[in-house]
Amino acid sequence: MLCDICHKSNATVHLTEIIDDKVVEMHICQKCAQSKAEELSSQPNIVDFLGGLTGLGRIEGNEKTLKCSACGLSYAEFKSKGRLGCEHCYSVFKQQLLPLLKKIHSSCAHYGKTPLGQDKLNSSQEYLKDLQAQLKRAIKLEEYEDAARLRDKIKKIEEV
């Protein structure tokens, strides 16, 4: 089989590209494969893209020595890989991650789906906070009967 690019040498490399939702297969020779690899390496990657959004390309003074104590990942390594090493990295690199998350997701808080079983937990916590706010309001307005009723409700919920 001849190379799809130069049509001279035998094809030794087989590439599959997705262009405009269509799968395109290419059979190319070693020489054309090298030039294709150079072409792909000149395109920006996701790490460079994300770095451009928040200035990850710049490393400031204390960021040069910033390292995760759990996995040993440095900020410079995170910046080059674009991936964190462990769950503790989120705390260590919090100051650097917050602007990035805000830029990408328009928020630093999660508003998506929650794991199964967490919905009940979250709604009961919100209900408890609401009852506590009502209790404070009742005390402030000197509605002691309502305050006692709310206090008892809160105690029952906290016992469970």
Image: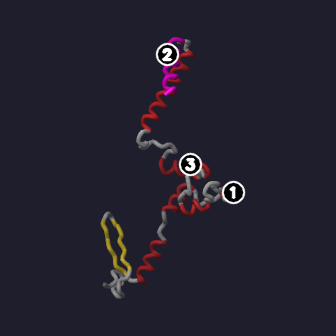
Q: Earlier in the sequence, mark 1 or mark 3?
A: 1
Q: Within the image, what quadrant is residue 68 found in?
A: bottom right
Tell me the kind of residue under disc 1. Gly
Q: Amino acid at mark 3?
A: Leu
User: Label 3, on which residue?
Assistant: 98
**Residue 149 tag number:** 2
The Cα atoms of the two marked residues, 2 and 1, are separated by 56 Å
| Separation of residues labelled 2 and 3 (CA atoms) | 42 Å
Q: Is residue 30 above or below residue 135?
A: below
Magenta stretch holds residue 149: yes
- Closest to the observer, 155 or 50: 155
> Which one is nearer the viewer's eye here, 128 or 11?
128
Check disc 2: other Cα within 10 Å, few if <14, some if 14-19, many if 20+.
few
Residue 135: give x, y in percent of width and height. 53, 20
Q: Residue 53: x, y in percent?
A: 53, 56
The amino acid beneath tag 2 is Arg
Mark in the foreground, 2 or 3: 2
How many numbered badges does the structure rendering display? 3
Over which residues does the magenta segment extend?
A: 144-160
**Dot 2 or dot 3, earlier in sequence:** 3
Horizontal side, residue 35 vs residue 64: left or right: left
Q: Classify mark 1: helix, strand or loop.
A: helix
Residue 41 location (% of width, % of height): 48, 72
How packed mark 3 is, by other alpha carbons closer than 10 Å (few <14, some 14-19, many 20 or more), is some
SS state under label 2: helix
